[in-house]
Amino acid sequence: MSKKLLVLMSIFLVVVILFTGCTSPADDTSGEPEDTTEGTKDTGEKKILRTNNSSEPGSLDPPLAQGTHESWILTNVFEGLMTYDENGEMVYGMAEDYEVSEDGLTYTFTIRDGVTWTNGDPVTAHDFEFSWKRALDPELAADYAHQLYYIKGGEAYNSGEGSRDDVGVTALDDKTLEVTLESPTAYFAELTAFYTYFPVNKNVVESNPDWAKNAETHVSNGPFKLVEWKHNDQILIEKNEDYYNADKIKLDGVDFDILEDQNTAWQKYSGGEYDLLVDVPTSVVYQLQQQENPELRIGEQVGTYYYNVNPDVKPFNNVKIRKALSMALDRETIVTDITQGGQIPAEGVVPLGLKDENGNDFRDGVGNLIEYDPEGAKALLDEGLAEEGMTLEEFNNNGYVLLYNTSESHKKIAQAAQEMWRTALGIEIGLENVEFQVKLDREKSGDYDISRAGWIGDYMDPMTILDLWWSESAFNDVNYNNPEYDALILESKSTNDQNIRMENMRQAERMLMEDMPVISVYFYTQPYVQKPNVEGIYKVPIRYPGITYADITE
């Protein structure tokens, strides 16, 4: 067992009595936590789980989703070929079986009998073929289209260099989907549980381009269905009685508020208005830890909290400046005094919890690639500024800003970074908070100096994060472009030889941390709280807490 895992487990044993997995950092609030044991609000005969989604979804059309503010809803109203069961284990979803050819290039999925869309249409292999090719269509401009590049012809079609007909996805009949890959991909079946691979109803999409914008026209195939969407206010989903596993779904529905303010959400939970809350203020997490409150869970989360540094903004184009910013951050203080949710100071970009070719933690095989050295950081800053022909006074007069999305937790972390940079380097960095979707849009357009970012893995392989800085990735918001890095990533994607894959990815991470386009801060956990009468919440390290099979008892 790795040293880091032992440390993490010891933290969990001290701060929680009962836990199921891990998630993301919480924010802060004022005052003492109130009594959190109040029962569920009377909803008549129906069992309605009440919680908060924290941000308005940009889209509830699977290929257009960009983050957890959408995926938490999508994973409950849609389902892919594979999915997760009530224990958080990977199981068959819309597929009842699949076969893989000896060369690992061809997957043949068989669709379950009797599965339907919420409008009564049958779910067929043709829907999957349509959906995956639609996600790759360059005109759709799906940010996650690159997740389908494993499919033969997928990248060529998406980049405009190939045709739709050449994409290796074919419905042989209503029940049989044949998929041909570019190269063997060990985690391909797991990818089909990710939301970009979710199907959409071909007839509905083709007849109404705006089908996903409102509950009245929304059609899905999962355990729940969308019944109301008050934009920027509330989302309601209810049990899909026609779901093939409906007898295992105990909730009648889930009500999601859309509140960005963590303090308000916490007050609703502590006042008995919510049964579950994922985005918990950091000071509350700390207080609940001290009380050993059994409502607190510290969930496992494969993810990294980091800062983008825009290389198109002088002097951040200079690697010495970027390294100076990184070396001046006291990550131990950030996780101990600010986030307070069992997070681990980052040692690179690849988080804990992902295995290498020998079944050991990938992180242990790479080692710590991050250094805390305030004096060395100041020397590097001076060298970098000199190379850019800029004085410290000129730097401070330029009004550089750290952008973060509205959250007390992000604010406190940003304030800590701001002070550490001021103290160690003598630089002044302003702070700006905006709504989450606004932040995402500004990062895409390059309208930032430094920005808060975070990534939760999409599948259990180091590639889930290293792929972000491949030069053609839609999420490469720092426009990192290193041909050697790209070559390592592409070779790792094109072979099933785990020795080659893992060694390439180790080299790629070292290269990334040498170039420092992003500054890793910490590895996530996901503190969340649930009422004593809520059961069946499970935690997959690459997802928000699973509520599909939850129950509310008396």
Image: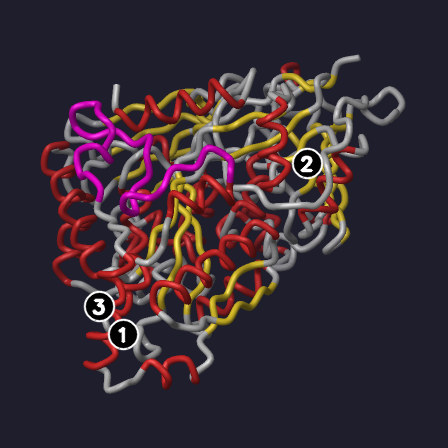
Q: Is residue 33 magenta?
A: no
The numbered mark, 2 or 3, whose residue comes first in the sequence reads 2
> Answer yes or no: do the residues labelled 1 and 2 have beta carbons within 8 Å?
no
- Asked where in the image residue 162 lies, by quadrant, the reply is bottom left
Q: Give the label on residue 298, or none.
A: none
Nearer the observer, 173 or 15: 15
Q: Which residue is mark 1?
A: 317
Q: Residues within 10 Å of mark 2 (few under 14, many from 20)?
A: many
Which residue is pictured at 57% across the width and 47% down the height? 70
The residue pinned by badge 3 equals 379
Q: Is residue 352 inside the magenta stretch?
A: yes
In the picture, measured across the screen, residue 535 lies left or right of residue 231, that is: left
Residue 519 placement: quadrant: bottom left
What type is the residue that disc 2 sits on? Lys
Q: Secondary structure at mark 3?
A: helix
Q: Name the residue tied to disc 2.
A: 225
Q: Residues within 10 Å of mark 1 (few under 14, many from 20)?
A: some
- Can I make out residue 202 in this image? yes
State the residue at coordinates (16%, 54%): 511
The three-letter amino acid code for the residue at tag 1 is Asn
Which portion, as a residue range, is magenta? 340-368
Residue 120: give x, y in percent of width and height: 67, 34
**Where the C terminus falls, by quadrant?**
top right
Sequence-first tag of 1 and 2: 2
